[in-house]
Image (tube, rainbow, N blue to C red):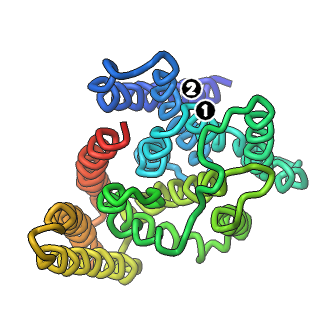
Amino acid sequence: MKIESHKSKIKFVKFSAAAGIYASLALCLYQPHFKNFHSLQYLLIVNVCLAALGCFLLSRRWVASFVGSFFAGAIYGFGPFGLWLSGYHPTVGLLAAAIPWLLCPATLCSKRKWRWVCAPLSALPFLAILLAFQVSTHYRLFPIPIHTKLHLADLAGLLAPLVALERTMPLVSFYHVPIAALVMGFSMLLRARRFGIMIIFAVGTILAFCSPFFNISPILWLTIPVLCCSILIGMGMQGLVLAGFSDRKWVLTTTVIMAALAIIALLLATKYYDIFAGLGAKYARLLVQTAKLYILGAITTAVFFFMARAKLRLAFLRWIILSLAMAVDILFCASFITYRVL
C-alpha cells in the first residue's frame, strides 16, 4: 500500500509540474496580446494548457519518460496546428483540447480485462467532433469555416510551417527538431505493429481530406492524427535517448533525413531570393531560419549516432541535449506563430 501511495504521489507531482510549465508557457505566449483580447479570448490560455495536459496524460500509456511525455504534450498544445486554431473562435481550441481527454478511457481499458470496449471508446473523439458541430449549428455558431479542409498542397507546410503561415496555409505541421523524433517514433510504431493507433491516424487523416458533411469543418478531423503524431514524438524522443549500438542505423537514417530537409530548405531559399525585385525575400529569410533549425536537429541526432556507435549510453546527457534543442525550436516558432495568428 505504501509503495502504491508513493507512486501516486510521484505521478501527481509530475502532472503538477507539467501543468505549471504549460501554464507559464501559455502566459508568456499570450500575455503580449492581452490588451487586444476580448473576454472570450482568454479561453485560449485554458485551451492550450488543457490540450497539452491531456496529451501528456494520454502519452503516459506508451511513453515511460516524463520528459518525453512533457514534450508530446507541448507539441500538441503549443504546436503549429494548435496555435493556428487559436486564430478562430475559442470554442474550436476547446474542442481540440478535449480530444486527448476523450481517448484516455480507451487507454485505461486496454490495460485491463475490458479490452473489448477499447474500440468503441476510441470512437469518442470522432463522436465529440460530430456532436460539437451539430450543437454549434443549432445555435447558429460557426466557429471555423465549414469548407476548410486539407489539400495535398497544404502538406508542403510539413517542411516549412513558418512559410506556410505567411502564405495563409493551414499549419498541418510540427516544429523542425521534433521531426527527428517523429521519424523514430513512426519506425517504432511500425515495428511494434500497433494497428489500433495506425487505424485511428488513417481515419482522421482521410476525413480531413474529405468534403464537409453534417456541417463539420473537415480540418477539425486533423486534430486526431496530430495528437497521434505528438505522442509518437514523445516515443521517438525516448527511442533516440535509449538508442544503443544495434539501433545506430535508425539514428543515422534520422540524421540523414534532417540534413536533407535542411538542404531542401536552403535550396528553396535560394530560389525565393532570385525572385524579381526581392518579392520573395520574406519567404527566403524564413526558409533560412527553417534550415538552421533542421541543422540543429541533424547535429543533435548526429551526436546521438556517434554516442551509440561508441557504445556510450549517457541517457541523462542525451535528454539534456535533445530537450534544449526541442525547447529552442518550440519557443522561437511558437512565439512567431502566436504573433502572426493573433
Q: Please tell me how crowded label 1 is: few (under 14), some (14-19), or many (20+) other residues with Cα within 10 Å.
A: many
**SS at circle 1:** helix
Kindly identify the residue that appears in the image at 40 percent across and 79 percent down. Answer: 250
Residue type at mark 2 is His
Q: How many marks?
A: 2
Q: Quadrant of residue 255?
A: bottom left
Quarter in which the C terminus is drawn: top left
> Visible in this render: residue 70?
no
> Visible in this render: residue 315?
yes
Picture coordinates of residue 277, whole percent (x, y): 9, 71
Q: Nearer the viewer, mark 1 or mark 2?
A: 1
Q: Please tell me how crowded label 2 is: few (under 14), some (14-19), or many (20+) other residues with Cα within 10 Å.
A: few
Determine whether 289 is above or below 51 in the image. below
Relative depth, front residue between 327 and 321: 327
Picture coordinates of residue 89, whole percent (x, y): 55, 34
Quarter in which the N terminus is drawn: top right
Point out the tag, 1 or 2, that comes first from the N-terminus: 2
| Disc 2 target residue | 6
Picture coordinates of residue 299, whole percent (x, y): 19, 69
Kindly check if marks 1 and 2 are in contact, taking CB atoms under 8 A apart as contact: no
Kindly identify the residue that appears in the image at 52 percent across and 20 percent down. Answer: 40
**SS at circle 2:** helix
Kindly identify the residue that appears in the image at 38 percent across and 65 percent down. Answer: 179
Kindly identify the residue that appears in the image at 27 percent across and 25 percent down. Answer: 32
Picture coordinates of residue 251, whole percent (x, y): 35, 76
Residue type at mark 1 is Thr
State how far apart marks 1 and 2 are (Cα): 38 Å
Name the mark on residue 72: none
Determine whether 120 is above or below 268 in the image. above
Name the mark on residue 91: 1
Q: Quadrant of residue 184?
A: bottom left
Please identify the residue farthest to the front as the structure is shown: 277
